[in-house]
Image (cartoon, coloured by chain):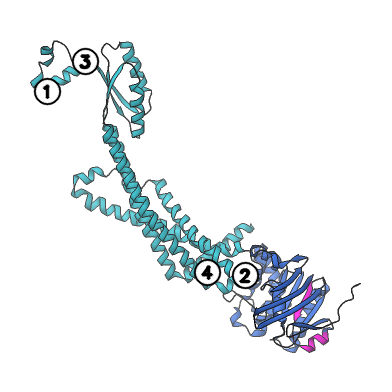
Amino acid sequence: MILFQNFRYFLSEALHSLWRSRARNLLSLATITISLAVTGVFLYLSLNARAVVRAWVRDIPMIFFLREGTSEAEVHRLREKFMSNPMVQRVSYVSPADALARFRTAYARFADLSAELGENPFPASFEVKLGAGASRAAMQSIVDEMRQQRSVSDVQFDEAWVKRLDASLLLVDAAGIFLGGILMLASIFTISNVIRLNIYSYQEEIEIMMLVGATLGFIRAPFLIEGAIQGLFGGALSLGALAVLLQGFLRYVAPLNPLISSFVKIQFLPFNACIAVILGGMIMGLIGSATSVGKVVRET
Amino acid sequence: MVQFFHVYKQYDRDTTALTDINLQIRRGEFVFVTGPSGAGKTTLLRLVFRDELPSKGQILVAGRNIGVMPIGKLYRLRRNIGVVFQDFKLLKRRTVIENICFALQIVAVPVRAQRQRAFAILKMVGLQHKMQSHPLQLSGGEQQRVAIARALVNEPPLLLADEPTGNLDPELSQEIMRIFGDINVHGTTVVVATHNREIIRAMGKRTVTLDRGRVVDDTGKPSEAA
């Protein structure tokens, strides 16, 4: 009951302070909004790039060539092994005869090759396709595991290409973290200074509160809530700005070039990322206000 | 209740507010601190609720050395001291009743009880009809009575009042002193800084006289055995 009573008081004081110093509070709100919107853009790019890479990874075929003379029982065992992996979506066995048939269809000019050689040069193989959510690490673990099988002679899998994709993802993430981090620090700095100015405008009241026995926590709480509210609204506004930006991009820019369209895999940030942006804003607001509240109230 | 041991307060090299103050105020005592302007009355009171720190010496309040109390724990001291400030120190953007309620709110008194107690104390100082006014809408005397009400509302064991009748007419001054006398009878230690000789004479209580920062007289002191 008392907690609720105090919270109501803190909240009304925080709202009063937000309204009283609305001009400078708008400045910090704008800073949070911009920094979180930029971070949101990078988050969108990163998540979208991950979705693109996942789709590519899914489409990259993995071919496991079998040694000559592999028994049917062994083929069955290997198929079962592939199927038991939850990342694997489809497994196809290609017998030497099937491989030759494919070759003849694909390269009609060399259709007589096997007759000339006197034997079928193509080994039996498994073609494996991974399902949604498969990563490079999952791919690599399947490859490593199958390489240890005695009946598997070779694996065809474009490892370098997948590695490059992974590296490019890291680059997007690093750019996002760097730029977003700098902007977030700037936001925290702005909130901290705005709250500090707000505290100075309440200096006389704070002094009286201390003299009549208010705890430091009681005096600080409204300012912390003020920072958190700024961060919360900044987070929500940044999502709004991001939505407008993305809608504009998807509606007017993406259709201009099919290549761009092919790279768009998600329409907006997923729900949990939206929550993370809003909570991130709130935490930034709290950190910003905490850095000045602790110092200034103590000095009063 | 309050003990001063060789207390000095110096603001800078040329300004000494208090010199070698040794004072003992017992629990339940009523003490006037008097002296001419600039004698150090206000400084002495401010040292008791640690609005200032002594330059030298030690001050004990309820047996605790307040000089070593960390700033984060000062509220424990101040919640046990009601202070009537010379400049009232009222929260200007709050109404009279909100000012009183604030002192109760910080000690977690439920809202309904806050209102009831604040109204009762305002009635006692004759300001119940002004409870929705803001401090700046009140006269100096009325603001002083609000400050008195706020200091008393928590029924503190120690009450410090700095010139509490400075802005009041003689009739109201007597009424305020009667209130202070009543709470003193109920066990509250009262220390009043004033240069109003008439009130001191009328009350007939212990009087500590300061002059240029030194205690020059201490009359009506209870005997050690008492």
Give how far across and how far down residue A140 sits, in percent: 34, 30
Residue at label 4?
A199
Q: Which residue is mark 1?
A: A107
- The residue at 66%/83% (across/down) is B15
- Report the amino acid beneath label 2: Met
| Chain seen in blue | B
Which chain is cyan in the picture? A
Name which of mark 1 and mark 2 comes first in the sequence: 1
Q: Position of residue A270 (x, y in %)?
A: 37, 45
Say whether disc 3 or disc 1 marks the residue closer to the N-terminus: 3
The amino acid beneath tag 4 is Ile
Residue at 30% across, 10% down? A71
Q: Which residues are magenta?
A: B188-202
Residue with the mark numbered 2: A209
User: Is B167 left, or right, of B5 in this rendering?
Assistant: left
Residues beneath discs 3 and 1 located on the same chain: yes
Spatial CA distance of label 1 from label 2 is 89 Å
Residue A190 seen in this snapshot: yes
The tag earlier along the polypeptide, 4 or 2, is 4
- Labels 3 and 2 share a subunit: yes
- Quadrant of the rendering where the N terminus of chain A is positioned: bottom right
Q: Which mark is residue A96?
A: 3
- The image shows residue B144 at horizontal and vertical percentages of 68, 81
Marks 3 and 2 sit apart, C-alpha to C-alpha, by: 88 Å
